[in-house]
Image (cartoon, grey):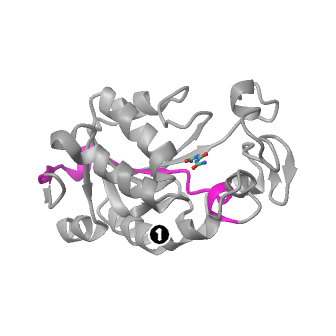
Amino acid sequence: MQLNANPFPFEFNVATTALVIIDMQRDFIEPGGFGETLGNDVSLLEAIVPACRAVLAAWRGAGGLVVHTREAHAADLSDCPPAKRNRGNPSLRIGDVGPMGRILIAGEPGNQIIPALAPVPGEIVIDKPGKGAFYATPLHNLLQQAGVTHLLFMGVTTEVCVQTSMREANDRGYEGLLLEDCTESYFPHFKAAAVEMMRAQGAIVGWTAPSAALLQALR
Ligand code: TIU
């Protein structure tokens, strides 16, 4: 099927496409998590949840493969480089105890995907120690085994984990599309710039489209 996208239409088949939802976990969306400890106003991000929910429901209805990622570290921090933990001057560092448990640690309350977008059995859940979804994870192998060639991206934050994941996917040969109203940044001008730079130069990294275009294609 064809999706009305930028900079030109995106051709895909549901059977060979996965919806990849990046890091829609409490750490970034709710107060008291990693996003806020870095000094960000997290309230902006919640606004995309209804659009993400509508896409997830439609994609599940079409029988499409769903991948959820979480930025997560092992409890002993063996997969967290000191350069990541020690960077800057956050109010709490990765592994410290915050209001939603230990910051960015797998299994802690803050590390769970928000209830509105919670995974269901049969969907892939990837815990990733980096910003990109492919670095130090089994994602590429799992997608290859499933015969996936095309990826639809949504999630947070646009210019950090979403953009890194789309670039990693592009270098691995996937055709990637970002759903414009299903991604957000703590910095609106960074979101705008990231969306533009991905689709510039003839889709140098990938395509972008409003979620309405996907919902229409699936109807
Ligand atoms: N800080 C920020 O914008 N993002 C992250 O640290 N991780 C993700 O984007 N998931």
Q: Residue furthest right?
A: 97
Magenta range is 8-30
Percent position (x, y) of residue 52? Answer: 43, 66
| Residue 108, image x, y percentages | 77, 50
At label 1, the amino acid type is: Ile
Task: In this rendered view, identify the residue nearer to me: 103 or 121.
Answer: 103
The residue under the point 51% across, 52% down is 157
Quadrant of the frame with the N terminus: bottom left
As drawn, 179 above or below 102: below
Count the numbered circles shown: 1
In the rendered image, the quadrant that contains the C terminus is bottom left
Q: Is residue 15 left or right of residue 119?
A: left
Q: Residues within 10 Å of mark 1 (few under 14, many from 20)?
A: some
Residue appearing at x 26%, y 69% in the figure: 215
User: In the depicted view, which residue is nearer to us: 47 or 219?
Assistant: 47
Residue 109's place in the image compared with 140, above or below, is below
Is 191 within the magenta? no
Q: Secondary structure at mark 1?
A: helix
Q: Is mark 1 within 8 Å of ligand 1?
A: no
Residue 14 counted in the magenta span = yes
Nearest the viewer among 8 and 135 is 8
State the image coordinates of residue 82 (x, y, percent, origin top left): 75, 25
Q: Quadrant of residue 217?
A: bottom left
Q: Is residue 41 above or below residue 196?
A: below
Q: Position of residue 106 (x, y in %)?
A: 72, 43
- Please say whether residue 79 is visible from this viewpoint: no
Q: Is residue 169 visible?
A: yes
At x 30% / y 66%, what residue is drawn? 211
Residue under numbered circle 1: 48
